[in-house]
Amino acid sequence: MCGIHLILDKQSKLRPAAVVQMAEATTHRGPDACQTYFVPTPRQTLLLGHNRLKITDLRDEANQPMATPGGQYRLIFNGAIYNFRQLRAKLSRKYAFRTESDTEVLLYWLAEHGQSGLASLDGMYALAFYDCGTEQLLLARDPWGMKPLFYFENHQYLIVSSEIRGILASGLVPKEPEPGQVSHYLQFKFAQRPGTFYRNIFELEPGGAYLSAPGKKLARMTDHEIATPKEAEPEDHQPVLASLSQNLSETVSRHLVADVPAGLFLSGGVDSTLLLALAHQAGVKGLPAYTIAYGREDKPYATQDHHFARMAARQYSAELHEVPVSRRLLDSFHEWLPTLDQPIGDGAAWLTWLLAQEARRHVTVVLSGAGADELFGGYNRHQAFHQYLKAYRWLKYCTPALQKAASLMPNRTGLRHWHKLASQLHRQPAQTFVNFTAHLPGMLVKQEYANIGEPDWDRERAWPEGAAGQASRFVEENLRSALYHDQRYYLSGDVLALTDRMSMQHGMEARLPYLGRKITQLANSLPAVYRLQYGRKWLLKDMLKKLGGKAYVSRPKEGFGMPFGHWLRTPAGRPLTELLTNQQSAIFDVISYASAAELLGLHIAGRRDYSSELWTLLVLAGWMEGEFGKAGPGGQRRYISPQLVRVNQ
């Protein structure tokens, strides 16, 4: 919806130009209006900036920053509050509203309830709420991290922005790399929170509420994650399916409400097709839908998304827009990379960027199926881990033999899942699932940077131990922890991060119905084993079949994939492969040239399929060159120095 920016000037010496620069650097997030405010208070000064993308109440009166009458409370907010009309009804006796926006409702709601009011919000948001009387600043993100927020703090300033580039644009923060992120990125494809790829710039945690007061540094307060009580396994599936169907239908309808046109990202898979089917059931006809289409030369190597998206659009009366993609897309790689803000090694980022670019020509809001896999057990690793847990009693003794067999198994298309399953088994369930989520081998990272920034899973969430005679409990608790892990890390660090960055890059708001409050509460209240009882996402598949979608349920899971591995073997891929064949590339300050060259060589020769791994490496290599790869004094280029290496705190 917007871009938000602020500088808390602790010494009241700063001029407004810095926050103006921040807002100007992120106009893509809110091209409809840009405003800044200078708010002096006795002990410090607050500078606020806002880029507005008009979604609800298009009048200028709904612009931000927004203040209560008399100016005691100030708010800047990015996102959408879907239950704002219900909250407004509760406030209407006390407050006189000037607009129809969710921003004004949120302002008065926080003025009335403070931090405790966050628990009542159903939506996606990142916000900054300032009390001029107490000079306290509240920063908060929604429980899933659908909307981003970053900060930098020293003894002079607290600087906050929706994007890292906004913080850097202030001119007050040195642009220095954080090499401790490389190891984590290569293994998991995204940065490890709270750190980023920039030294001393941090990301607020999803569901985190942070407070800043005069004389004190920003501190994390109690989280406002949505409570999800565990329920016993239902004996009858029909009430569960009926409740899920009703709540998801209502959520889809609510997410389509806007004062601007709305559309849908459509892959033809279960998640997006179910959203389309529910919209059609609710009476929405001609909903604009956007999908990727490959040319004849790439069809043998590409996914079947285009075919199924066409079929779904005809069946559920959508207006399909096809975005043509070919290997010539590689020519725009270096143009696209800076839009990431920081590296995300997921090919879906580029395709989402292309879809958003086309969609923005027709709509301002787009629905996405993101979040369904993490809630309902949709990934191959979920099913594999479930089987591993059920066979744990004997499998733990066979692990060494299976790992040896994996080393002899070719890592080619069709065998990749089996190769990964066998090679990453471990006697500890927690480590096994972490291995399933891992990506590139740690050996790529040079010794002085190895094993840096790996997550401390036990500190974040303890893995329960299985007791004799309690096999079912052992499976359930470990599988629930696995789903929680993906929701806590992969969903927010990869899926939601790329969805926000790539849609907002084109001034478009992506909405995520599967992460609506009622849906997430229902999903996480169900036993994890129940969610995988009849296979991956069986609950959503059953719903779609009842809406005539059996064909989409039966197709293989693909998502918005591209034949990147094939493209690298063609002349079109040579400019990119040079990033990994040039020993002067910035990436080789951190990783082993020989190891990267071996991966590339085996892939180009067709002996191995390293499509995903090479994409992750090339995104990192290109980003490093663009951000820090220019030659220094005497022509020597150095991305990092060992003195900068540290573990993010």
Image: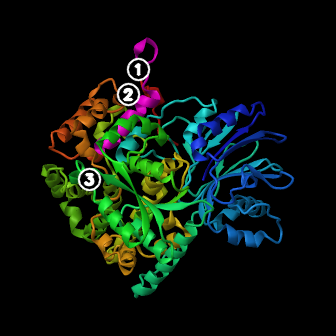
User: Disc 2 versus disc 3: distance between alpha carbons?
Assistant: 31 Å
> Where is residue 551 shown, x and y percent of the image?
29, 72
Q: Nearer the viewer, mark 1 or mark 3?
A: 3
List the residue tagged with mark 1: 637
Residue 561 visible here: no
Label 1 to label 3, Cα distance in Å?
38 Å
Vertical comparison of 24 with 209: above or below:
above
Which residue: 83% across, 68% down? Answer: 94
Q: Secondary structure at mark 1?
A: loop
Q: Secondary structure at mark 3?
A: loop
Query: In this view of the protein, which residue sits in the foreground, 597 or 525?
Result: 597
Q: Position of residue 342 (x, y in %)?
A: 47, 40
Q: Amino acid at mark 2?
A: Ala
* Magenta region, residue range: 613-636
State the image quarter where residue 489 is shown: bottom left
Q: Which residue is mark 3?
A: 302
| Disc 2 target residue | 586
Residue 630 drawn in magenta: yes
First-in-chain label (2 vs 3) = 3
The residue under the point 30% across, 51% down is 294
Crowding around mark 1 (Cα neighbors within 10 Å: few <14, some 14 to 19, many 20+) is some
Q: Work out whether mark 1 precedes mark 3 in sequence or the reverse, and give the earlier one.
A: 3
Q: Nearer the viewer, residue 43 or 236?
A: 236
User: Which of 87 and 224 lies nearest the eye of the viewer?
Assistant: 87
Position of residue 404 measured from the top left corner of the image (x, y, whole percent): 15, 52
Identity of the residue drawn at 34% across and 42% down: 616
Direction from residue 79 to residue 61 in the image, left or right:
right
Label 2 crowd (10 A; few <14 / some 14-19 / many >=20): many
